[in-house]
Amino acid sequence: MNLVNLKVACFLYNQFTDYDNNYLKFLSRYKSIDLSTIDQVIDLIKWLRSWGCRQFKIEFEDISISSIINWYRVNSLKIPKINNHLIDYNLDKNQDQIIEIFDDLSMREASKKKYRDKTINIRIGPVGTAKTLFALRPNLFSPWDISIYQHFKLDGNGYGYIEYLSKIQKNLKELREESVKSNLDWDNIFTYLNKKHSYYPKLIDEYFWVTITKGCDTAVIEKIFCGKTDLMI
């Protein structure tokens, strides 16, 4: 991945989905998210549904609300501080704590479903958990989806999520070095990428979503657009 590949991916991401708008609308309601309050948890769940989390069924919303509030009550002090940024964060030192809060939320109940003559509990799961952590700490955590973590042969649990964050961190460091060599302002890279948000981990996730989940080859698309748009450096 290089900056041009990332710019192509961000361009395609903007065309494919309005996920950014959904997230920014959610964030605009609160200076910081407090999942001990029912109203904010309800808004979180609505946003998670808009981002494809079908496990949060409307008819079982009381279960989802209770699970998230109880998880937050137990784990709020274990969640890293809001001013932590992934690119310089010590994942090795803090991995046990992140794994613990990830796995705890992932295993909690989101809803139920009928299967034959049985009622089955539906977990919040790894995708819903990653997106919730991203909502809480977007400078540190990243969303992911099943296609992405399976592509990288990662487990859908806290340990796999740490490996995913490590991969994103490595890419961010390499891109920051490239931006210096290209005389691009890393602190203002979101303008270059034409992004409305300003969260570095999500940039890499957008690249993976476009190239893995959607199966687009940004190098091929770069050649198509070269000289025809403002996609190039």
Image (tube, rainbow, N blue to C red):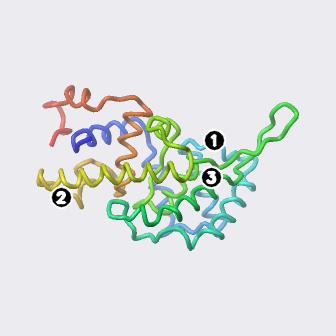
- The quadrant the N terminus occupies is top left
Circle 2 residue: 185
Does residue 43 appear left or right of residue 28 in this picture? Answer: right
User: 160 or 63, which lies in front?
Assistant: 160
Q: Can you tell which of label 3 and label 1 is closer to the viewer?
A: 3
Q: Residues within 10 Å of mark 1 (few under 14, many from 20)?
A: some
Mark 3 or 1 closer to N-term? 1
Cα gap from disc 1 to disc 2, whole angstroms: 39 Å
Q: Residues within 10 Å of mark 3 (few under 14, many from 20)?
A: many
Among numbered discs 1 and 2, the one appearing first in the sequence: 1
Quadrant holding the C terminus: top left
Disc 3 vs disc 2: Cβ atoms closer than 8 Å? no
Q: Earlier in the sequence, mark 3 or mark 2?
A: 3
- Amino acid at circle 3: Ser
- Secondary structure under badge 2? loop
Q: Residue at x 62, y 66 (%)?
A: 72
Residue occupying image coordinates x 46% and y 45%: 19
Amino acid type assigned to the residue bearing label 2 in the image: Asp
Residue with the mark numbered 3: 106
Q: Helix or strand or loop: what does disc 1 sit on?
A: loop
Q: Position of residue 5 (x, y in %)?
A: 25, 38
Q: Which residue is mark 1?
A: 54
